[in-house]
Amino acid sequence: MTDPSGGRRARRQTFAERRERRAAVDDPAVVLDAAARFLETRSRSISEVRRRLATAGYRTELVEGAIARLVELGMLDDAAFARAWVESRDRARPRGERALRQELRLKGIDPAVVDEVLAERDGAGDGGDAGEPATSPDADAADRLLARSARLLARVADPRARRRRAYALLARNGFDPDTVVDALRRYVASTAAAEPELDEDG
């Protein structure tokens, strides 16, 4: 009978052996190539690349040299990474500023860079049509998140329970209380306006 713990031990030893071999590497090109391969699937932050190479076992000075070279080549850029991250979230998975800050912090982005990128996001917010108030990126993102979840929310028959579900959804996704309350007000108004039409059709 095969000993499963023996297999796990062999895998651990193999990983340890790989780390040991990488620790013995003294060619900067090898580490640079490993970093470039890590960047092939998607862009990464400097911190992610550093963590990956260090975990693999490469020596610190070679890791830092590879990172410096990738920055110099424009392949690593934390500000560009943060902008792309925020744009992707705004487009595909709307989040509030609080959640975006937390996600970028976990990616190792410097707080000053995060401040700059989110300030740019605020500056790019919708100025509104003539005579209409400007909306913030967070307000737009909250409205989009509720619109995406409209069918799921509509399954909750009780209006109060539906509002609580919508509130929890927005809060979970990092929207501040004022943004949540305003978004809920717009959501309730839009669903109330739609309900008479549904009743007439029915």
Image: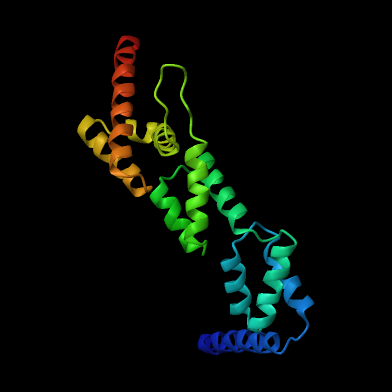
Residue at image point 63% right, 75% down: 53
- Residue 159: horizontal and vertical position, in percent? 23, 30
Q: Which image quadrant: the N terminus?
A: bottom right
Please provide percent x and percent y for residue 139: 39, 35
Asked if one can make out residue 181 in the rendered structure from this viewpoint, the answer is yes
Q: Nearer the viewer, residue 162 or 111?
A: 111
Locate the C terminus and report the quarter of the image it occupies: top left
What residue is rendered at 54% in x and 85% in y?
8
Q: At 40% from the left edge and 45% from the top edge, which residue is drawn?
A: 96
Left or right of 134 on screen, residue 12: right
Position of residue 136 measured from the top left corner of the image (x, y, whole percent): 42, 35
Q: How is the image coloured?
A: rainbow
Q: Is residue 155 visible?
A: no
Above or below, 8 against 105 in this view is: below
Q: Residue furthest top?
A: 200
- Is 106 placed above or below 170 here? below
Q: Quadrant of residue 10?
A: bottom right
Question: Between 132 and 48, which is closer to the camera in this rendering?
Answer: 132
Question: How far across and how far down the image is residue 170, in percent?
Answer: 34, 42
- 117 or 151: nearer the viewer: 117
Tell me how many marks there are: 0
- Horizontally, residue 108 falls left or right of residue 192, namely right
Q: Nearer the viewer, residue 152 or 146?
A: 146
| Residue 5, above or below 70 | below
In terms of image quadrants, where is residue 162? top left
The quadrant in which residue 133 appears is top left
Residue at figure coordinates x 50%, y 42% from the top left: 121
